[in-house]
Image (cartoon, rainbow, N blue to C red):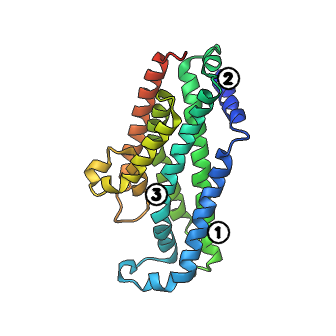
């Protein structure tokens, strides 16, 4: 356990001055700002729509915000996974990292967890920003902490599959541009996959679409399939990383 802690601490130090931390904080602030402007200008219009009948202000905020966030989140997670591995290829330090008296499995897990931590910080910040936006807009209802909490939890489950897939790709492919391109294409294609609920269950890039806590959305997809695929691809990634020879 102490070895893993030291590896994780090392990953934090490697990313200490990187642009990943600002991205984790600024992305939800940007998305929240856009949602604030959107509802500030069109709140009455949205509430008057028949399709939004029965929604309270917090439901409406999450619905409008989710139209952006389901793309922002997986795109940034893809960047996190790619950049955490890219730093090893860029500095040619894989040999030094793997020469440490620890197993490759722990090295891989440390990188997986740093991506998960960065992504979790972004998700939690997004939840806080949404509460601030709702208060700033003067919603008549009290803050819906349960709704926001569900949104956060569903996203936590959804990103596990994406992190595992992109970490596997980023560890196997030394060209970061290719790893990023695969992730971006996957995210861009997620709307197409989401047309079929049966298909999107097996597409990690589409799992974040189903994180909106709404009766019309099957939130079991991120909980069941996001987590299951996350564990499966994590094990696959560890298996291949253990066999990897880096010259």
Q: What element carries label 1?
A: helix
Q: Locate the C terminus and report the quarter of the image it occupies.
A: top right
The residue positioned 32% from the left and 43% from the top of the image is 202
**Crowd rating for badge 3 (residues with CA inside 10 Å; few <14, some 14–19, many 20+):** many
Q: Looking at the image, is 54 positioned above or below residue 8?
A: below
Image quadrant of residue 38?
bottom right
Image mark for residue 2: 2
Residue 232 percent across, percent down from the top left: 39, 32
When asked about the image quadrant of residue 224, the answer is: top left
Q: Which of marks 2 and 3 is nearer the N terminus?
A: 2
Q: Is 132 located above or below residue 176 in the figure?
A: below
Q: Tell me, yes or no, if residue 112 can be seen here.
A: yes
Identify the mark at residue 53; answer none if there is no mark.
none
Answer with mark 1 or mark 3, whichever residue precedes in sequence.
3
Mark 1–mark 3 distance (CA, rounded to whole Å): 20 Å
Quarter of the image for residue 196 reads bottom left
Residue 28: give x, y in percent of width and height.
Answer: 60, 59
Please state the total of marks drawn on the protein image: 3
Residue occupying the point 49% across, 34% down: 167
Q: Disc 3 marks which residue?
A: 70
Circle 1 sits on which residue?
132
Task: Answer whether labels 2 and 1 touch (C-beta < 8 Å).
Answer: no
The answer to which of 91 and 107 lies nearer the viewer is: 91
């Amino acid at each position: 356990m102490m070895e893993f802690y030291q590896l994780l601490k090392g990953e934090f130090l490697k990313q200490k001055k990187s642009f990943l931390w600002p991205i984790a904080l600024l992305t939800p602030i940007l998305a929240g700002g856009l949602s604030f402007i959107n509802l500030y200008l069109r709140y009455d219009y949205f509430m008057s729509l028949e399709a939004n009948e029965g929604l309270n202000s917090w439901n409406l905020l999450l619905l409008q915000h989710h139209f952006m966030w389901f793309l922002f989140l997986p795109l940034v997670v893809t960047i996190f996974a790619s950049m955490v591995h890219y730093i090893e290829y860029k500095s040619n330090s894989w040999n030094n990292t793997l020469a440490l008296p620890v197993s490759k499995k722990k090295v891989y897990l440390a990188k997986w967890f740093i991506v998960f931590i960065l992504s979790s910080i972004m998700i939690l910040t997004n939840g806080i920003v949404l509460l601030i936006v709702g208060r700033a807009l003067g919603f008549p209802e009290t803050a819906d902490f349960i709704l926001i909490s569900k949104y956060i939890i569903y996203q936590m489950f959804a990103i596990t599959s994406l992190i595992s897939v992109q970490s596997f790709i980023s560890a196997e492919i030394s060209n970061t541009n290719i790893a990023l391109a695969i992730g971006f294409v996957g995210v861009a294609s997620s709307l197409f996959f989401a047309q079929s609920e049966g298909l999107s269950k097996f597409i990690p890039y589409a799992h974040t679409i189903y994180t909106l806590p709404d009766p019309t959305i099957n939130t079991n997809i991120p909980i069941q399939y996001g987590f299951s695929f996350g564990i499966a691809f994590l094990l696959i990634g560890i298996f291949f990383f253990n066999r990897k020879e880096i010259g």
